[in-house]
Image: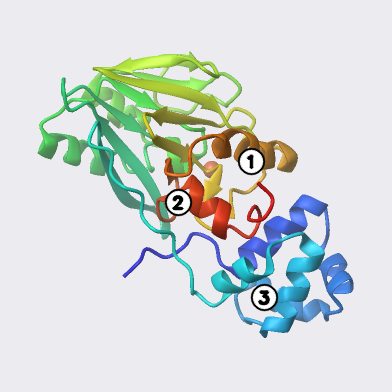
Amino acid sequence: MPLTLEDELGDILQKARDGKSWSQKDLAEAAGLKLDEVRRMERYEWTPPEEIITRLAGVLDLDGPALSAIARNAWHPKPPVADPGLDLVCLNVFMGTYPVKCYLLRCPATNETAVVDTGANPETIIQKAREMKVKPSKIFLTHAHPDHAWGLDLLVKEFKCSTWIDAQEPRPDGTDDFQFVKDGETIALGELNVQVIATPGHTPGGVSYQINQTILSGDTIFAGSMGRANSSWPDLYRSITQTLFSFPDDTALHPGHGPATTVGEEKQHNPFFCGKS
Ligand SMILES: [Fe+2]
């Protein structure tokens, strides 16, 4: 059973409206729909017929067939091929009822390990690290939202390590021991090179971490959708189309929510981007 996508039709419509600074009323008028119909779609209460999905895609600059496939739950990304050069353990956790992903990244040659985002579940990370018999030496944060950064106090107490984050992000609670990342910087993790890639837009200092052909991309892109543009929609769009999509098609993307995907899958099937990159 494939992992459920993070975003449904209603989320995608909201985010595409956001890109145009449109209200629900603006979308209803542009697409020739009733306001209540737009509201019901965005509340996940109504999946419209194909003809309306095509019309919505047209006015929102989305790809019609790709949007339709997601609306009908007919597309899931092909999972990326695991990179034998690194061990990446994905923890599917919850903040309340909201599903989040966080990761343990291990260098197979040296066993040196990093936590990537906390998933607001430090206990789960600590338990998994004990099972793996590793003691992470670094905590990499993609951004400072609580579902990615809450619980640093417990992790730092257990692992006694620094936390890497972009200086433009607010300082998460739980530690004062921060190292500030810079775009293009390489951080060693055993024999692995972890490259920092600035991917702003969801937040001002959002970053992704690239190791070989694997990118941990936080809330920049989701399979079949994009993150919420809390700081800048154009920046977020550029972070995806000009930065993440500059990597080869078989590059794995591991987002903070929803299933893993690849650059190629998103170029072909993401309604925001396919046909445009
Ligand atoms: Fe976030």
**What separation in Å lies between label 3 and label 1 (alpha carbons)?**
27 Å
For label 2, the SS is loop
Give the residue type that dot 1 points to: Thr
Query: CB of residue at label 1: within 8 Å of ligand 1?
Result: no
Q: Which residue is drawn at 33% across and 51% down?
A: 93
* Mark in the foreground, 2 or 1: 1
The answer to whether residue 24 is above or below residue 243 is below
- Label 3 vs 1, first from the N-terminus: 3
Residue ID for mark 2 = 257
The amino acid type of the residue labelled 2 equals His
Q: Decide: marks 3, 2 in contact (CB < 8 A)?
A: no
Residue at 63% in and 60% down: 271
Q: How many neighbours does mark 2 have within 10 angstroms: few (below 14), some (14-19), or many (20 or more)?
A: many
| Colouring convention used in this rendered image of the protein | rainbow
**Residue 108 in the figure: left or right of residue 232:** left
Residue at (57, 40) in percent of width and height: 245
In this rendering, the answer to whether 190 lies above or below 212 is above
Q: Quadrant of residue 268?
A: bottom right
Q: Quadrant of the N terminus?
A: bottom left
What numbered label is drawn on residue 241? 1
Sequence-first tag of 3 and 2: 3
The residue indicated by pointer 3 is: 41
* Rendering quadrant holding ligand 1: top right
Most foreground residue, 182 or 126: 182
* Residue type, mark 3 in image: Met
Q: Percent x, y for residue 200?
A: 62, 32
Camera-near label (3 vs 1) is 1
Question: Which label is found at residue 64?
Answer: none
Residue at the (43%, 21%) spot, across then down: 164
Q: In which quarter of the image is residue 13?
A: bottom right
Q: At numbered mark 1, what does the secondary structure look like: helix, strand or loop?
A: helix
Question: Where is residue 189 shown, x and y percent of the image?
Answer: 29, 19
